[in-house]
Image (spheres, rainbow, N blue to C red):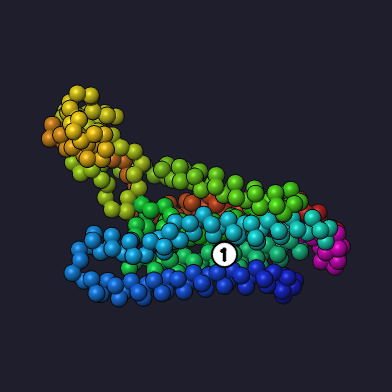
Amino acid sequence: MIWLTCRQHRGQLLVMSGLLAALGVVFLVSWLEATAFVASHAGLGAGDLDAALAERYQAVYTLFGWLPIVAPALVGVFWGAPLLGREFERGTHQLVWTQGVSPRRWLAVKLSVLGGAVALGGLAMSAMVSAWRPLFRTDTFGNIGIFNMLGVEPVAWWVFAFMLGTAAGAVLRRTLPAMAVVVGVLAVMTFTLFSLSDHYATPARVVTTEAGVEQDARLVSRAWTDPAGAEIAVPPSGVCPRDPGLGRGERAQLAYERCLIEKGYRYVFYVHGPERFWRFQLIDAAILLAGAGALGWLTVRRVPRSG
């Protein structure tokens, strides 16, 4: 059964391996070129160097921006959805499930082999991103896109997407509708987990005169304190008049906030610091893998015990 599963799905396995290899080549080439670029611009400050790298490798950064969304969607759409949806559509399940191997055993082997391959693929992408990222000094915790491609996040997302597609195919018994369900549910889950992550721990309260939070921190909310130290949502109107000559843009806002600081007001930020990286990773992974387990249970329930 294991050999048969690998042979039947060798096209998907080869395509995933090829895409990961191509991604690795992109990372390797950009890393080697960036190493030479950094060495030739050693006199630049850290901020200027980061800006120069961002401008030079904008295409790679754009790829980074799409990968956390596109990669799990591809797994769910092209690995999960056709697994049972195509069998039901073509009626081939009537032949497969009347052989010597029971439907439940057939499904268990399929899910184990393909799910394991999906998990290894997510782990490979995480390893490549981890090796590539340090040179470019991108945030690992504050940047949710990078966060979702490091550690155990890719494994959890890929396995969840695979099980989601499989369950959708088992319930709908059609491939295209199952693909649509995968895309829609993954989009909802992405925003849901991002919103939930604010509540994984109590955010730290930071009172400061600086307009930004610490590097690589996640901002949950912000407020102000008045000169007496009481926290307020926004300073009272009229404390600092706005300069009409500056309009209503960023310069005007910065001038207004500097005036407030001079009058004793302070920024209040509620943040999660980068030390919570693994805590958030493991909670996200636990939620996604629990969801994958529930979807696996649903899939098994939709498959008869015997053909």
Percent across and percent down for residue 242 are 19, 30
**Magenta stretch: residue 218 in it?**
no
Specify the amino acid type for callout 1: Ala
**Image point (55%, 52%), residue name:** 288
Does the rendering let one see residue 142? yes
Label 1 crowding class (10 Å Cα cut-off): few <14, some 14-19, many 20+?
some
Percent across and percent down for residue 135 are 32, 68
**Magenta stretch: residue 103 in it?**
yes
Q: Is residue 46 shown left or right of residue 57?
A: left
Number of numbered discs visible in the structure rendering: 1
Q: Is residue 156 shown left or right of residue 140?
A: right
Q: Which image quadrant is residue 72 in?
A: bottom right
Does the rendering let one see residue 293? no
Percent across and percent down for residue 237 are 23, 24
Q: Which image quadrant is residue 14 in?
A: bottom right
Quarter the N terminus occupies? bottom right
Quarter the C terminus occupies? bottom right
Which residue is identified by label 1? 119
Answer above or below: position of 116 versus 272: below
Magenta stretch bounds: 93-104
